């Protein structure tokens, strides 16, 4: 029986590899700051916002891969556990249990919106060593997408034999997916309108409609989490812009995601990569 199962699995893998890679229309990152919040010592899922975003994706009629952040289910949990004198493997288990709570709720809401979600934790796609993804496998994700499912990847902690663990953020997964599949557009859904010329909490801050790798932006005085804060996100978005259009918009405002999916200009920031010697 075991030999038969192994033989069938090999055949499935061969069939997947024979299929042409999907041509992605969209990559969508739902930021943890949009779909969650921390209330005192309680982690809260913003279900109403999450439902609206799911239905905006559905209403667009476009197919997408969705990546979501972990919010306090990941960031806060990591910070708490790193302070504990505890076995590293136990920490990994506890953090993964926490991030799955959020991911399970995302799947339920997406299923209610008839998006046919299927979960892909980062450790199902990547193997890490010394903080780098040394192997990547998108075969099954590719297969599920072609069959009509919506792959849902999320930020989580992964085992790393050299560093004991690696925090694989949703942004890191967005970069690897964009690099491999070369989508038409990557949309980052945040809790702010876009990239500002200074901390958006400053009343003099101005929204930048476009930024590039040559833009000089100050990220001083921003709150930084275990995934690098807005400065880290910006650097990742710049790298992604080598492969596709990149936009950052406010997911707390109705219809902005829907309009951006459909190629309409909304209040937000376009991020692009400017090569030396070439004008855009």
Image (cartoon, rainbow, N blue to C red):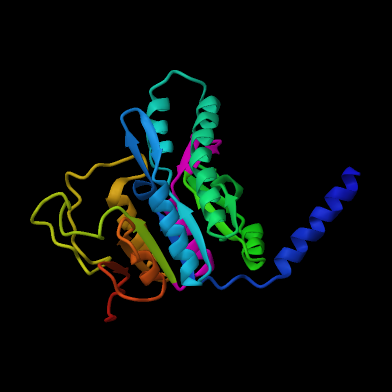
Q: Quadrant of the N terminus?
A: top right
Against 153, is 244 above or below?
below
Is residue 240 within the magenta segment? no
* Residue 255 appears in the figure: yes
Span colored in magenta: 156-184
Q: At 51% from the left edge and 38% from the top edge, which residue is drawn?
A: 101
Please tell me how many numbered marks the rendered image carries. 0
Left or right of residue 10, residue 40 in this image? left
Could you say where residue 149 lies in the image, as x and y percent from the top left?
Answer: 61, 61
Q: At 80% from the left edge and 53% from the top edge, which residue is drawn?
A: 9
* Residue 130 appears in the figure: no
Residue furthest top in the image: 85
Could you say where residue 199 lies in the image, as x and y percent from the top left?
Answer: 17, 51
Q: At 55% from the left edge and 49% from the top edge, which residue is drawn?
A: 108
Left or right of residue 20, residue 178 in this image? left
Against 119, is 246 above or below?
below
Against 100, is 192 above or below?
below
Q: At 23% from the left edge and 67% from the top edge, which residue is drawn?
A: 214
Could you say where residue 92 lies in the image, as x and y percent from the top left?
Answer: 52, 31
Left or right of residue 272, residue 15 in this image? right
Residue furthest bottom in the image: 279
Residue furthest left in the image: 204
């Amino acid at each position: 029986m075991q030999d038969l199962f192994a033989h069938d699995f090999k055949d499935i893998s061969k069939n997947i590899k024979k299929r042409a890679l999907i041509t992605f229309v969209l990559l969508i990152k739902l930021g943890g700051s949009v779909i969650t919040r921390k209330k005192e010592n309680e982690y809260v899922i913003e279900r109403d916002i999450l439902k609206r975003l799911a239905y905006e994706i559905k209403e667009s009629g476009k197919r997408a891969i969705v990546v979501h952040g972990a919010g306090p289910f990941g960031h806060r949990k990591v910070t708490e556990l790193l302070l504990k004198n505890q076995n590293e493997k136990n920490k990994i288990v506890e953090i993964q249990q926490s991030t799955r709570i959020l991911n399970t709720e995302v799947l339920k809401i997406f299923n209610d919106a008839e998006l046919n979600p299927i979960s892909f934790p980062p450790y199902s796609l990547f193997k890490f060593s010394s903080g780098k993804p040394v192997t990547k496998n998108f075969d099954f994700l590719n297969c599920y997408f072609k069959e009509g499912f919506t792959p849902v990847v999320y930020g989580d902690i992964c085992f790393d034999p050299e560093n004991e663990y690696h925090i694989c953020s949703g942004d890191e997964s967005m970069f690897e997916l964009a690099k491999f599949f070369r989508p038409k557009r990557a949309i980052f859904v945040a809790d702010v309108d876009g990239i500002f010329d200074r901390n958006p909490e400053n009343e003099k801050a101005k929204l930048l409609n476009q930024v590039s790798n040559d833009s000089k932006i100050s990220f001083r005085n921003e709150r930084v989490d275990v995934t690098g804060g807005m400065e880290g996100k910006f650097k990742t978005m710049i790298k992604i812009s080598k492969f596709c259009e990149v936009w950052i918009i406010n997911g707390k405002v109705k219809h902005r995601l829907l309009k951006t999916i459909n190629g309409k200009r909304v209040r937000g920031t376009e991020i692009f990569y400017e090569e030396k010697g070439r004008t855009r």
